[in-house]
Amino acid sequence: MTSPRVEIDLGKIQANARCLVRRLGDRGISVTGVTKAFCGHPDVAGAMLDGGVVGLADARIKNVVRMRTAGINCPISMIRAPLLSEMEDAIQHCDASYNTELDTIRKLGAAAKKLGASHDVILVAEMGDMREGILPENLNECAAHVIATPGVTLKGIAANFACMGSAAPTGDDMAMLSRLADQVEGACGPFVELVSGGGSANLPWALGEGSTGRVNNLRLGEAILLGTDPVSGKPIDGLHTDTFALFAEVIEARHNPSSMPTKPSPLEYRKLELVSNVGQTNRSILAVGQQDTDASGLKFPSGVGFIGATSDHTVIDTGNANVSVGSEMKIGMDYSALMRAMSAPDVEKVVRHGLSENGVYKESRPRPILKLV
Ligand SMILES: *Cc1c(COP(=O)(O)O)cnc(C)c1O
């Protein structure tokens, strides 16, 4: 098998989706599966759908086209505003898009009319993340314009949290989003069927005790894919965190004198595991680099420390472990490392099914070994 590669456990991704769909369903919230971190890989998208998500969403048309070409025909939304240069593709391949600019919405409407198609618009409200969004005081007026625009239908409103910023939404933030939904309907009529509260950062709130108000949808990527909370980085109860693994081959394995000074790693390598130079015995090099993944987001097996990475090499301290050239290391990834690995052309993607017949994930048991007697 080629290296580097990402091995993907579809059964665990499906189980994660199913678990979140059930728990949020109990709270009146539907789940849209966000496919951008895996570039719309059709098998992974399929695992999300098998887990019961109501639809999919991506930020890039190219990923949506990839899923459509593979025969995925569920509702798909664009969660980044379509570019003016890709209006027709957006209309043809997406049922809805998240928008903040009236000019874009008018052009979407014109393209939809031209193609004889319908297209839903979800208006994104700015609620403190300071990425895209319409200021709450302008939302009613904007909604009225969308309603008056031929070719598009206002479907609802949405918010983003912890995308640019790192703050998880509070109960007050979410109550405010519900009030915005009421406010738009009070001014414009019953056009706010969908109130999409945010992404995985909303889960502590959504699975908590407080009222969910009018919020009836979340768009989930990280929680389904990695089983982690993007704000704390911690595993979410009941979800699998070993869904994706990166495999990289060792191309140098050396006993280095501990007196040899190793330069400190640059600060930009966040979350690096600090490894003492004193008594350092083994430094190895993996044939994987920044061009293949975000090396600062790699999670090495215990006892292995990250020293640094360049475009094509990752240097690790393997401590006392005996690592040989040609052997492979299995490495975990955070969301950033996963996203880069899934979009890197030199990283092979290998899917594993791992589902039992009733669709419930079972830990695979070692197969019985046949003995010649
Ligand atoms: C990426 C993205 C999401 C999904 O975020 P996760 O933290 O991966 O759940 C949701 N909404 C928008 C607009 C996004 O860009």
Image (spheres, rainbow, N blue to C red):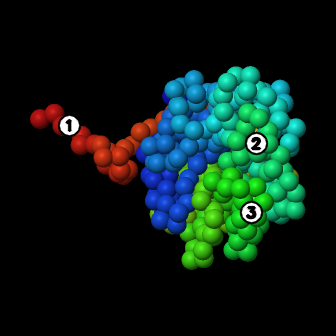
Residue 237 placement (x, y as % from top left):
51, 66
Q: Amino acid at mark 2?
A: Arg
The residue under label 3 is 186
Foreground: 78 or 246? 78
The residue under label 2 is 80
Q: Residue at x 38, y 50 (%)?
A: 361
Q: Earlier in the sequence, mark 1 or mark 2?
A: 2
- Disc 2 element: loop
Residue 330 placement (x, y as % from top left):
55, 45
Foreground: 288 or 233? 233
Mark 2, ligand 1, within 8 Å: the answer is: yes
Between disc 2 and disc 3, the foreground one is 3
Q: Amino acid at mark 3?
A: Gly
| Disc 1 residue crowd, few under 14, some 14–19, many 20+, Cα 10 Å | few
Q: Residue at x 50, y 52 (%)?
A: 17
Q: Do labels 3 and 1 touch, CB within 8 Å?
A: no
| Disc 2 residue crowd, few under 14, some 14–19, many 20+, Cα 10 Å | some
| Residue sticking out furthest to the bottom | 209
Q: Amino acid at mark 1?
A: Leu
Q: Residue at x 83, y 46 (%)?
A: 145
Is residue 18 shown left or right of residue 302?
Answer: left
Is residue 225 shown left or right of residue 305?
Answer: left
The residue under label 1 is 370
Is residue 180 shown left or right of residue 348?
Answer: right
